[in-house]
Image: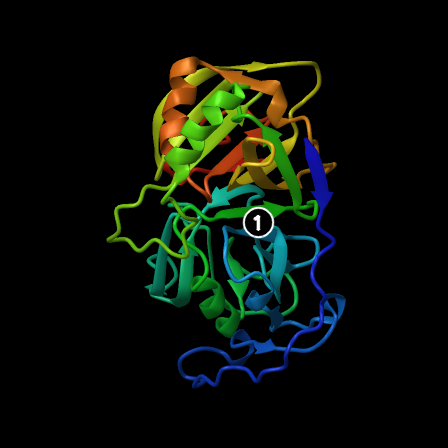
């Protein structure tokens, strides 16, 4: 297996003015401004945006709570960074792995006096979301992640239902993994053509609207319960016992499938490691095997942009809340 660490993009970006919005609609500090400066120097409400550095491919979002920053990656390349405001004490934003469950450009809160929540990207059905909101420079929300309005509108255009969102106290830069054979099963080279053929015509989504029928496929592997689940949209459609080779924890990793690699006759992934240590583990995927029937079903369902989550947390109501698809740390 080959490992390449991405060092991140050049942090200087084109200067643009902020989006003008009437004060009666939304507070001025929530609008935000795209700026030309180093990421470490971003002030509340400021952000960088440079999607042309990687115009296509699956998107992953990392919310860094200690930094109060949101990092956006596409195909492992960082294309944007924004300041944010997470949950205040008593309303802490949960850490873990989420996926975008619903998108609503003009959402209003059903809990907080019909408050406007523009460009909402729902992460849990119980109320955690990314959306435009107040940005005082410190955690101030009721659990959501507040973003500058202009940035939230731009982010809305490149995410889709199923886009992974990692909320973490620590995380690695994305790293690339090329895995010989198909993950969960070391198939012979003669089988690669079949898998490659099955992926033909399947492209990483630019956006899935509610009305579209393309299913979003995710896989969750837990070392605690030695269980692996295949999730279509937000429903578990297959479960298998999980065999893990070797000793030691799996760690907390999110793998996003890029597609087949004909050179090694295997699959190419972009991974983000999060959690306490946040150390990439190139051997993690190779340690896993599952039942033949589960692997066959996954092979039929997989598509570029498919998300695979590895966790040492049990898949229980305390860590995974049904259709919320939340892996709480």
Give the position of the C terminus as an image quadrant.
top right
In which image quadrant can residue 300 be found? top left
In which image quadrant can residue 270 be found? top right
Across and down, in percent, residue 220 comes to 49, 29
Across and down, in percent, residue 146 comes to 53, 63
Q: Nearer the viewer, residue 212 or 263?
A: 263
Q: Which residue was labeled with disc 1?
A: 92
Q: Can I make out residue 321 in this image? A: no
- Side of 60 relative to 169 (left or right): left
**In the depicted structure, whether residue 170 falls above or below residue 44:** above
Q: Nearer the viewer, residue 13 or 313?
A: 13
**In the depicted structure, whether residue 155 falls above or below residue 149:** above
Helix, strand or loop status at disc 1 = loop
Give the position of the N terminus as an image quadrant.
top right
Q: Which residue is at a point 51% across and 34% down the rendered structure image?
A: 308
Q: Which residue is at a point 59% across and 69% down the rendered structure image?
A: 50
Across and down, in percent, residue 135 comes to 58, 69
In which image quadrant can residue 253 be found? top right
Q: Which residue is at a point 65% across and 78% down the rendered structure image?
A: 35
Q: Can I make out residue 325 in this image? A: yes
Query: Mark 1 packing: few (<14 Cα in 10 Å), some, or many (20+)?
Result: some
**In the depicted structure, whether residue 188 falls above or below residue 89:** above
Q: Nearer the viewer, residue 150 or 124?
A: 150
Across and down, in percent, residue 322 comes to 38, 33
């Amino acid at each position: 297996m080959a490992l390449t660490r991405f060092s991140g993009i050049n942090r200087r970006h084109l200067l643009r003015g902020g989006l003008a919005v009437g004060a009666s609609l939304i507070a001025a500090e929530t609008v935000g401004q795209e700026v030309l400066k180093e990421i470490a120097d971003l002030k509340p409400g400021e952000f960088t945006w440079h999607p042309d550095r990687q115009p296509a491919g699956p998107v992953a979002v990392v919310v860094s709570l200690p930094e109060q920053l949101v990092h956006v990656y596409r195909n492992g390349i960082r294309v944007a960074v924004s300041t944010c405001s997470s949950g205040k004490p008593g309303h802490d934003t949960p850490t873990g792995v989420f996926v975008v469950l619903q998108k609503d450009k003009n959402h209003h809160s059903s809990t907080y006096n019909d408050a406007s929540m523009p460009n909402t990207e729902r992460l849990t059905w119980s109320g955690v979301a990314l959306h435009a909101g107040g940005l005082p420079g410190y955690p101030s929300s009721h659990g959501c992640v507040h973003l500058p309005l202009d940035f939230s509108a731009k982010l809305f255009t490149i995410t889709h239902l199923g886009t992974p969102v990692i909320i973490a106290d620590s995380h690695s830069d994305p790293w690339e993994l090329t895995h010989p054979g198909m993950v969960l099963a070391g198939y012979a080279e003669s089988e690669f053509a079949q898998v490659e053929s099955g992926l033909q015509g399947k492209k990483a989504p630019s956006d899935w609207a509610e009305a579209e029928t393309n299913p979003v496929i995710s896989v969750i592997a837990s070392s605690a319960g030695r269980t692996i689940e295949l999730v279509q949209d937000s429903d578990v459609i297959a479960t298998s016992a999980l065999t893990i080779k070797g000793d030691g924890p799996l760690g907390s990793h999110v793998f996003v499938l890029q597609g087949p690699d004909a050179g090694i006759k295997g699959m190419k992934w972009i991974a983000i490691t999060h959690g306490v240590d946040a150390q990439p583990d190139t051997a993690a995927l190779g340690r896993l095997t599952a039942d033949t029937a589960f692997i066959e079903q996954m092979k039929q369902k997989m598509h570029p942009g498919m998300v695979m989550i590895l966790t040492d947390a049990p898949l229980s109501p305390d860590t995974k809340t049904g259709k919320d698809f939340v892996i709480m740390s």
